[in-house]
Image: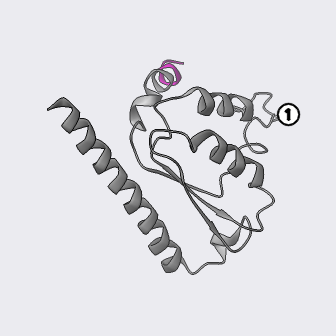
Amino acid sequence: MYLRQLKIEHQNTFIINQPSLLLAPEISNTAGVENPFLNFFVFPNGSQTRCMIKESKTLFNLTAIISFKSDCIAKDDVSFFIEQLQLRKCPLLHFELEGWHLEPLAIESSSLVDYVDKVLETLRQRLLEECKAEMSLLS
């Protein structure tokens, strides 16, 4: 119990202003699945996750999404993230590639790693620019 409480109290401090890359994010059908054998709910469920994203003003400020044009599995959640994050302090970066939800399994790993690295570098650059802007306001 103590460990869970500690995680809840400090969960926001670990990812604030950290560049995040979501690859074909799918939260609607996987979170909150009841396990009839163990009789518990996954926490947080899809509804709670959406609420946290909507209500948070400090999380997901440096976020990029890579989605796939023929992805029917993550389509709704990608749209949700775009809607919620496009008006943040650092607007969402969205890259749409050819393929479907499991496309990363078919992409040559070095090509995917190179692409992901470029996206994360763009986010890191935004973080540096944000820090410089905050520092100039303090001067």
- In this rendering, is residue 88 above or below 78? above
Nearest the viewer among 105 and 74 is 74
Residue at the limit of the structure toward the left, as seen here:
139
Q: Is residue 120 left or right of residue 134?
A: right
What range is drawn magenta here?
1-5
Q: Tag 1: Cα neighbours inside 10 Å, few (<14), some, or many (≥20)? A: few
Residue 26 visible to the viewer: no
Magenta residue check for 13 = no
Q: To which residue does mark 1 refer?
A: 36
Q: Is residue 65 left or right of residue 129?
A: right
Nearest the viewer among 39 and 53 is 53
Magenta residue check for 4 = yes
- In this rendering, is residue 53 above or below 66? above
Q: Position of residue 63 (x, y in %)?
A: 50, 49
Q: Is residue 17 left or right of residue 57?
A: left
**Amino acid type of disc 1?**
Pro
